[in-house]
Amino acid sequence: MTALEGYLRARINAEGALSVADYMATCLYHPQWGYYLRKDPLGAAGDFITAPEISQMFGELLGAWALAVWQSMGEPADIVLAELGPGRGTLMADFLRAAATVPAFRRALRIHLVEISPTLRARQKQTLQDAQVIWLDDIRTLPAGPLLLIANEFFDALPINQYVMDDDGWHDRLVGIKQGKLAFAVGPLADINGPPATAGDIFEINKPGREIARWLGQHLTVQGGAALIVDYGHAITAVGDTLQAVKRHRHAAILDDPGDADLTAHVDFQALAEAANAATTTNVISQGSFLRSLGIELRAERLMSTTPQKADMIQSACRRLIEPSGMGTLFKVRALTHPGLPTPPGFVR
Ligand code: SAH
């Protein structure tokens, strides 16, 4: 039994079953044994791998995207560049290298990283040692001023509540103890509006995600700027149990070894857009078509011609990012912008 499981059992015995959000938040963020507080989950030796860790092209293209948005804003001399959950800092490093091709853009950027994990903060410090960076715990403490914000695989990491449809309506889904083991249970009726469902269906609400999106929508509308959200998930709100545990690149059981596996859920892009509706939201497009329209294939060819010894690697990384068999269709992209801005590159409105 992990130390965290001992702690969870004691809490359940004392307070009763926990909501799925409580369970997830404890597994991920417990100050001593929480998943994100203890280890660096990324890379081949970790539990999962993300787009910026697959190829430098990902961060570079996001940098090119942000440059175009900055130009459409009239090239402000000062702009807050923020990243939510920056992992190892790889995306930001690639972004900044691309940004440096236009010195006025690079000079305008005031870099802010919103990161909860001390382990990953240290890693980011190492990766970005040449840059001036401010770290924050919470997006709501970002300074005033126009904002460019990037969030790759951030919203999926936030705790979700789950609800189960029964004959009389939606009920909270809980984590309790049954026959000596952690087990899911059905709790009291919940006061929520879910999509059409039949008995047994599960519906998920990412409350912290919605709150962040609401804040972001208001901030962009008042201060100007744009945000880019990249994650796996669905364009339209729907029922479905998408909570998953991943350990060493394999699926694991959600209630096994709490704190040792990464727990995530698919992102409901419609719910985020509704929460952010003070800002203008683009349509949702696949990561594949987004990266293609930003020119990833051309960028790959360029890289292959300068480093022919790495051509195979570059080619397969490019495929993995854009093809349906890789991350191309599961991953989706949506931008939020100040209502006065044109549709950002890569999207149609
Ligand atoms: N964007 C990175 C890492 C994705 S993993 C990449 O693409 O490689 C999720 C990241 O979000 C990690 O950096 C994790 O520590 C951070 N994170 C998770 N929950 C958070 C929270 N509530 N507040 C701030 N950062 C959080």
Image (cartoon, helix red, strand yellow):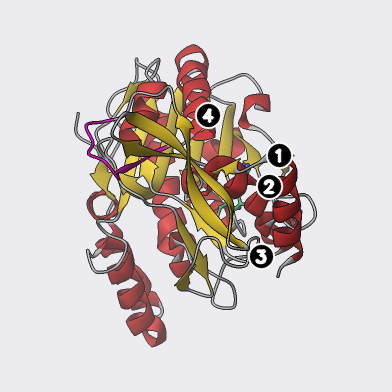
Number of residues whose C-alpha sits closer than 10 Å to that of mark 1, classed few (under 14), some (14–19) or many (20 or more): few
Magenta residues span: 195-204
> Who's the residue at 34% across and 23% down the image?
193
Pointer 1: what residue?
A: 15
> How busy is the neighbourhood of tag 2: few (under 14 within 10 Å), some, or many (20 plus)?
some
Of callouts 1 and 3, the N-terminal one: 1
Q: Position of residue 272 (x, y in %)?
A: 39, 30
Q: Position of residue 45 (x, y in %)?
A: 59, 78
Which residue bears the numbered disc 3?
Answer: 40
Foreground: 90 or 184? 184
Is residue 94 in view? no
Read off the residue under disc 2: 12
Picture quarter containing residue 178?
bottom right
Mark toward the start of the polypeptide (2 vs 3): 2
Report the amino acid beneath label 3. Answer: Asp
Is the C-beta separation of discs 1 and 2 under 8 Å? Answer: yes
Q: Given the current orientation, which residue lies at the most extreme right position?
A: 32
Q: Secondary structure at mark 4?
A: helix
User: Magenta region, mostly helix, strand or loop?
Assistant: loop
Q: CA distance from mark 4 to mark 2?
A: 29 Å
